[in-house]
Image (cartoon, grey):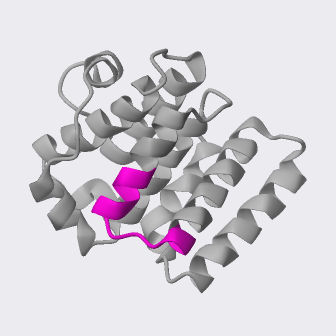
Amino acid sequence: MKTQLAGLGPKERRTYFGLLSAVAHADRRLDDGEVTLFAKLVKIHAGHLPGDPVSDDLRSTTPLPPELAIRLQGSDARFALYLDAAMMARADGMVSDEEVWLLNGLQRRLSITQDQAVALCNLSIAALLLEQKRPTQAHAERQLLTAEARLISEDVPSASVRHVRRFSES
């Protein structure tokens, strides 16, 4: 299944993953959960990147260049980027002030409303619960369905975040 990153070139995909790496490094420590999530996102979005994507990209952090921010502002890929960044911020079990600061800046640069950001953050929580099957698979599925319904009410296209369903499969 193609994701929203299919239309981005290799340099733009590296920037995308570099930004996720910046979120992972924002609290100045790298957790196993962040490394695992990063590897899953690379597998889901990119398939194959030159070199070893986890070690190459997770070591280098990249700010969101203005030209990519402008290109993403009008596309559904901006929602995928914000969702992935929110999941990365939560992957270690807590969200630091630095990660919140990065997410707020990303929200503004990508022209995502506050309500859309909240809906995407709720989806990120539900996706991580589903991946961990916590507290149960059925409960996690209900959380995910509720979060997806909220996205629809906030005009976030479901196709832009459909990759989240693949977490329980990978």
Where residue 5 appears, as percent x and y from the top left, is 29, 55
Asked if residue 14 lies left or right of residue 131, the reply is: left
Indicate whether 24 appears above or below 144: above
Q: Tell whether position 163 is magenta.
A: no
Where residue 87 appears, as percent x and y from the top left, is 55, 43
Q: Main secondary structure of the magenta part?
A: helix
**Can residue 64 be seen here?**
yes
Q: Tell whether position 106 is magenta.
A: yes
Q: Give the residue displayed 57% in from the left and 17% down from the top.
A: 32
Q: Nearer the viewer, residue 13 or 102?
A: 102
Quadrant housing the C terminus: top right
Which span is picked out in magenta? 104-116
Q: Give the residue displayed 57% in from the left and 32% down from the top.
A: 96
Q: Give the residue displayed 43% in from the left and 67% down from the top.
A: 160
Q: Give the residue displayed 66% in from the left and 76% down from the top.
A: 150
Where residue 104 appears, as percent x and y from the top left, is 43, 53
Where residue 114 appears, as percent x and y from the top left, is 51, 69
